[in-house]
């Protein structure tokens, strides 16, 4: 790895350390890693058996992260609880993305030159979503690791000087894409289809056989691992996700957006300062246009689905950054434009970095549930504690890694009747009024992000004109007659 790859690694590491808690989207993978590190073999105590979620997810990714986390965790004392273990697991994922990205950047350098590779690294290291989210336990982030490798071999299949090398690159790409689609994220099949279509003239019997073998092996791997951990025969999680979201069309239950939303909202947010140069690269460089075309088609396909999230198109970010780097390199070839181009590229990268820092700070305020549970552990000395964690608290930072006291009972059961809360000594709740008249009193409150306050007048006094607005979000309540 070169220094620019180390810069990305530092950015990813700092993001994980500054914002150690996780959100509900990461819940399955985070809890699965905890349970694998603690027990290994599946048992009734595994979180996913008690809270299975809407659709199942594969255990292949959590098994890999757990295996890579285990040696360091073992040396640290083999702790399955604790924020440090959670951070370690997240860093393993983040560093895997950094490593895969370094391999892709190395291929960029081989094909397009060192200047293009450098600007590719600079743009990525300054983007919020490519630093903050690369250590987040999402299926999309797990899938980004093999997708970056697939993109590396995609470049090789397109631009290698040797025909045999191009053919091998296509076979490697096909195998990696098959594994990613079948095991980690079914929706990456959209990108896989356009990437393969771009090399249609090269697809022969060898490629087809390689692809078929990879699909079969990946399917068998998922069936073996997930049937065991989910305790169900013929469990193939990604097929069930496909059936739920696409065949049944249930994904729209989580919100809908207009067809243009990926292009007008998410792409600008993902690329930030790289976006203008990405447009220049696509217009001025034939190879950039060739690369971008496949991903533009993929995003257009995603746009047909009413439910849209930025993470669905995360694999497009490296290609967008590559197009931006090619745009800078193209303008840099014009002597009269060289200095303004470099100054503008540095200014846009710096602006992206400033936004990334601000967004990371704001994101750190979005985990009142995690902070509330940590506060409860630091202030409650009794060993006889039965704490109920409501849905909002559980969604904003509470994981099993944070359940530190083995003598305590932690409960996340939803839909309890008012009388049933009397079985608990403490509550983490977003609705204190519901319990204040039922024998509980507030002992502490955790605030969280509630928006931005913009006050331009503060510029006159050399103060920041923008500040985060906080409001109480999670209350710690104690039953009045609970033993001390």
Image: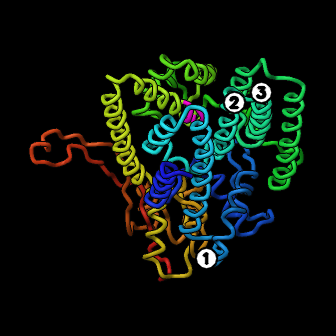
Q: Residues within 10 Å of mark 2 (few under 14, many from 20)?
A: some
From the viewer's side, name the closer residue of 317 and 246. 317
* Residue assigned mark 1: 76
Q: Find out whether the residues at labels 1 and 3 contact each other: C-beta distance under 8 Å.
A: no
Residue 180 position in % (x across, y down): 73, 40
Residue 415 position in % (x across, y down): 60, 52
Residue at x 43%, y 65% (from the top left corner): 476
Which structural element holds mark 2?
loop
Q: Is residue 398 above or below residue 244?
A: below
Left/right of residue 144 with respect to residue 481 in the rendered view: right
State the CA–CA distance, disc 2 to disc 3. Answer: 7 Å
Q: Would you say residue 396 is visible in this rendering?
A: no
Left/right of residue 302 with respect to residue 240 in the rendered view: left
Residue 371 position in % (x across, y down): 44, 63
Q: Is residue 416 above or below residue 200?
A: below
Q: Which residues are magenta?
A: 314-319
* Residue assigned mark 3: 163
Q: Find out whether the residues at labels 2 and 3 contact each other: C-beta distance under 8 Å.
A: no
Q: Mark 2, mark 1: which one is toward the viewer?
A: 2
* Residue assigned mark 2: 160
State the CA–CA distance, disc 2 to disc 1. Answer: 45 Å
State the CA–CA distance, disc 1 to disc 3. Answer: 49 Å
Residue at x 46%, y 63% (from the top left corner): 438
Which structural element holds mark 1?
helix
Magenta stretch encompasses residue 316: yes
Q: Find out whether the residues at labels 2 and 1 contact each other: C-beta distance under 8 Å.
A: no
Quarter-of-image position of residue 147: top right
Disc sitting over residue 350 in the figure: none
**Farthest left residue in view:** 460
């Amino acid at each position: 790895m070169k220094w620019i790859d180390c810069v990305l690694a530092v950015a990813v590491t700092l993001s994980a350390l500054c914002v150690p808690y996780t959100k509900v989207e990461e819940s399955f993978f985070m809890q699965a890693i905890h349970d694998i590190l603690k027990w290994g073999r599946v048992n009734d105590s595994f979180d996913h058996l008690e809270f299975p979620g809407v659709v199942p997810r594969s255990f292949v990714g959590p098994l890999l992260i757990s295996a890579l986390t285990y040696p360091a965790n073992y040396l640290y004392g083999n702790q399955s609880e604790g924020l440090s273990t959670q951070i370690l697991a997240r860093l393993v994922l983040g560093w895997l993305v950094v490593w895969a990205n370094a391999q892709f950047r190395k291929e960029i350098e081989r094909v397009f030159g060192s200047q293009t590779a450098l600007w590719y690294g600079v743009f990525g290291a300054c983007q919020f979503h490519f630093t903050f989210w690369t250590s987040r336990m999402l299926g999309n982030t797990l899938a980004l690791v093999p997708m970056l490798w697939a993109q590396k071999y995609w470049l090789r299949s397109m631009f290698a000087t040797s025909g045999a090398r191009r053919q091998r690159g296509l076979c490697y790409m096909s195998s990696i894409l098959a594994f990613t689609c079948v095991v980690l994220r079914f929706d990456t099949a959209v990108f896989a289809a356009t990437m393969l279509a771009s090399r249609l003239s090269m697809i022969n019997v060898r490629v087809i056989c390689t692809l078929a073998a990879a699909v079969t092996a990946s399917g068998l791997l998922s069936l073996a691992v997930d049937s065991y951990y989910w305790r169900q025969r013929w469990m193939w999680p990604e097929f069930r996700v496909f059936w739920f979201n696409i065949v049944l069309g249930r994904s729209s239950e989580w919100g809908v957006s207009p067809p243009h939303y990926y292009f007008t909202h998410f792409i600008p947010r993902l690329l930030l300062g790289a976006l203008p140069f990405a447009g220049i690269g696509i217009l001025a460089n034939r190879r950039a246009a060739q690369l971008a075309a496949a991903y533009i088609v993929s995003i257009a396909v995603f746009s047909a689905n009413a439910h849209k999230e930025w993470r669905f198109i995360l694999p497009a970010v490296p290609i967008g950054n590559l197009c931006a780097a090619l745009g800078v390199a193209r303008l840099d070839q014009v002597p009269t434009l060289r200095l303004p181009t470099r100054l503008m590229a540095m200014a846009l990268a710096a602006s992206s970095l400033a936004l990334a820092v601000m967004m990371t700070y704001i994101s750190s305020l979005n985990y009142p549930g995690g902070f509330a549970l940590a506060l409860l552990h630091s202030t409650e000395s009794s060993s006889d504690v039965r704490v109920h964690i409501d849905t909002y608290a559980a969604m904003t930072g509470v994981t099993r890694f944070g359940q530190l006291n083995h003598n305590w009972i932690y409960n996340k059961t939803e839909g309890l009747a008012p009388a049933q809360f009397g079985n608990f000594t403490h509550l983490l709740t977003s609705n204190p009024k519901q319990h204040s008249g039922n024998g509980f009193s507030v002992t502490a409150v955790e605030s969280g992000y509630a928006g931005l306050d913009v006050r331009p007048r503060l510029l006159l006094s050399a103060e920041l004109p923008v500040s985060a607005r906080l409001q109480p979000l999670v209350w710690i309540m104690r039953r009045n007659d609970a033993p001390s």
